[in-house]
Image (tube, rainbow, N blue to C red):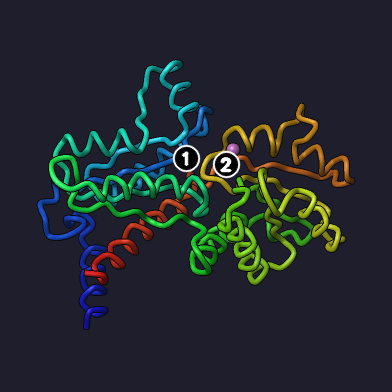
Amino acid sequence: MQKIISALILAILIMIPSASFAHDEDESKSAFLVVSFGTSVPEARKAIDNLVDTVKKEFPSVDVRLSFTSNIIRRKIQKETGESIPTPAQALAQLNDEGYSYVTVIPTHMIPGEEYDEVCNVANAFGGISGKFGFEEVNVCRPFLDGVKGCEAVADILMKRFSDKLKDNETAIILMGHGTPEHIANAQYLQLQLALNQRAYGRFFVGTVESAPSINDVMAELKRHPEIKKLILSPLMIVAGDHAQNDLAGKDEPESWINILKKNGWNEIDTYLVGLGEDENMARELVRKIYALYDAVSEEE
Ligand code: CO
């Protein structure tokens, strides 16, 4: 019965996107806080803005705020443009000051790694404060590569994203994830690889900048597929920022993936340097995660 009721609530929410979010409380008391690592590359920012705009459109009556976790990036933007983007802690303190009671934190992170843990730490700390400086409730959405289902959803999105390129049987897509060393969440990249193998075996190769699988692991796998003649390099990140431009496709960087692959005999290489955040299907997936969180929260109660 509980399941049916929460499914009904979800159905109503989907039908009326402007319905009050989180409980029957006054909707003006609910806010969303989108949390991104941030980017200092101005052209890459539209990926984050697309996610924020999609959430705003889906929930027009909820106040949607943005925060960045990278202090270096926040300070650089402040210095260069004057725009002041708060940390998650600053944004939550501000929302508290403005009288919001229910906050849904929406990380745009790919894996539940170190960065995601830090976002949860801040959210849980604020959620644990009672009284004047606390909230009624602070909930956190799951990241994109979240277990089998999350990886399958992202694999489906990648299949659509590269459907044109997959028509040519000699082409493989090389995806650069960020990676998180010393963290179990790094295994999500292999989970995604499995989901991609099930959909298009030998056509997608997932690696990371900072952890495993590395570019060497990617090349070892590629060698098992002599039919692949052409590579397309693309970031498996929300923004096509510094890592995409330099570590992936940097022509002047001797250690960039494009140069390593060329050195190792792959000559036909294209790049597709567009952040996943610009993909409409990723934006829809983020919205789906908000509904999934609401469903999980209402099941608990
Ligand atoms: Co990095």
Image position of 213 (left or right of 18) = right
Q: Residue at x 25, y 68 (%)?
A: 10
The answer to which of 298 and 242 lies nearer the viewer is: 298
Image position of 75 (left or right of 21) = right
Q: Tell me the kind of residue under disc 2.
A: Val
Q: Assign ligand 1 to one image quadrant.
A: top right
Image position of 23 (left or right of 297) = left
Q: Position of residue 160 (x, y in %)?
A: 56, 59
Q: Which residue is mark 1?
A: 47
Between the residue at mark 1 and the residue at mark 2, the CA separation in whole angstroms equals 8 Å
Q: Residue at x 27, y 64 (%)?
A: 297
Which quarter of the picture shows residue 163? Answer: bottom right
Which secondary structure, mark 2?
A: loop
Q: Is mark 2 within 8 Å of ligand 1?
A: no
Which secondary structure, mark 1?
A: helix
Q: Position of residue 55 (x, y in %)?
A: 32, 48
